[in-house]
Amino acid sequence: MMQFTKLFTGGTLSVNVSFVRSLSSNTAAIVKVHRSIYARRYPTMMVLPDGATINLSYHEPRRIIKLPLDLSLLSEAERKARIEKRKPKQKIRIDDDVEDTFNANKYLKYLKKK
């Protein structure tokens, strides 16, 4: 708390003024945080819906943040294709019938007896 006293021609004026300032190392930052070590900030890539990428520092340790695509801006065919990609794919079950013509008795003559 600071106290200022100013003299006037008619007398004195006493004013009590308190300054509350919240200063940090980022006060003068205009474009980016000018620190070599960011406190709890992690390098992250943000991917916009059109595919453009932006590198930024994020408060959580994530590598990529992908913004959602607005389906109302797409054409009807593109919208249906996107919705089909979201659905779970059905597993294709293939049953192979293999004919087994192997005869183990045919190779018994090659076994060595002790």
Image (cartoon, rainbow, N blue to C red):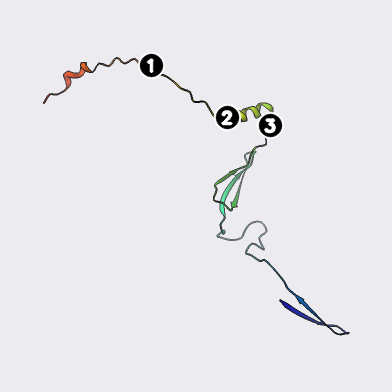
Tell me the element at label 1: loop
Mark 1 neighbour density, 10 Å: few (under 14) some (14–19) many (20 or more) = few
Residue under numbered circle 2: 87
Location of residue 4 with respect to 49 vertically, above or below: below
Q: Position of residue 84 (x, y in %)?
A: 60, 28
Query: Mark 1 or mark 3, which is nearer to you?
Result: 1
* Amino acid on which the number 1 mark rests in the picture: Asp
Mark closer to the chain start, 2 or 1: 2
Q: Position of residue 16 (x, y in %)?
A: 76, 77
Residue under numbered circle 3: 74
* Amino acid on which the number 2 mark rests in the picture: Lys
Residue under numbered circle 1: 97
Residue 39 left/right relative to 17? left
Mark closer to the chain start, 2 or 3: 3
What is the number of the mark on residue 22?
none
Q: Residue at x 62, y 30 (%)?
A: 83
Residue 8 left/right relative to 30? right
Work out how far the residue at label 2 is from the one at label 3, CA to CA, in angstroms.
Answer: 18 Å
Residue 54 left/right relative to 100? right
Q: Residue at x 59, y 52 (%)?
A: 57
Residue contact at pointers 2 and 1, CB within 8 angstroms: no
Residue 26: image quadrant is: bottom right
